[in-house]
Amino acid sequence: MGLFSFIKDAGAKLFGHEEEKALETKSIEEINFEKAQKLMNEITALGLPVDDLNIVIDEDRAVVFGTPADQETKEKIILAVGNTEGVAEVDDRLEVANPEPEATFYTVKKGDYLSKISKEVYGDASKYNVIFEANKPMLKDPDLIYPGQVLRIPPLD
């Protein structure tokens, strides 16, 4: 458990243009509730198994509760929530039954690509696929990463 920082203005958009306009007439509580619902739907759509998932939005912080299947799923949930535009922090309240060693997180910089990141963190550019696989299903293509995105960097076995 902990607090994870993200770049607030980077990441996937929760709402389309028409939805954004509709939010202008709602209270902050209604907006935060709708954002939380969208994030929970995204976790479900990604197929990340978690029992009793609940997300509470407080300004630009997302507080995430639940019991994920394992440490990897926990980290992917944190990243899926944090790599969303408008989220600057994720307060991790997820409880894993059997904690495993944690992966590190890496924030993509301009000019980065997975083999470059792999060379930096593992000393071997050819290990880029380890990073790609560790970030599925959020990453669909190893060439589609963007500055500000946060990636899981698992330990090598």
Image (cartoon, rainbow, N blue to C red):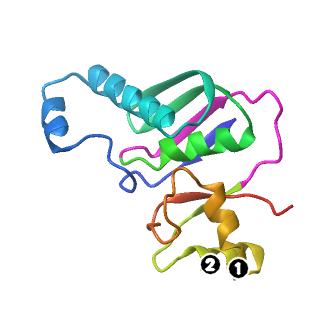
Q: Which residue is mark 1?
A: 126
| Amino acid type assigned to the residue bearing label 1 in the image | Ser
Q: Residue at coordinates 42% horizontally, 43% vertically from top-left?
A: 87
Q: Give the Cα separation between the discs numbered 1 and 2.
A: 6 Å
Q: Which residues are magenta?
A: 86-103
Q: Quadrant of residue 134?
A: bottom right
**Label 1 with label 2: CB-CB less than 8 Å:** yes
Image coordinates for residue 75, horizontal then vertical, percent:
65, 44
Residue 126 included in the magenta stretch of the image:
no
In screen coordinates, is 21 left or right of 9? left
Q: Circle 1: is it few (<14), some (14-19), or many (20+) Cα within 10 Å?
A: few
Amino acid of disc 2? Ser
Q: Is residue 141 left or right of residue 78?
A: left
Q: Is residue 135 left or right of residue 103?
A: left
Q: Between residue 42 and residue 59, name the one nearer to us.
A: 42
Residue at image x 31%, y 20%?
Answer: 29
Q: Which residue is mark 2?
A: 115
Quadrant of res 65: top right
**Lower position in the chain sequence, tag 1 or tag 2:** 2
Identify the image quadrant of the N terminus: top right
As for residue 93 lying within the magenta part, the answer is yes
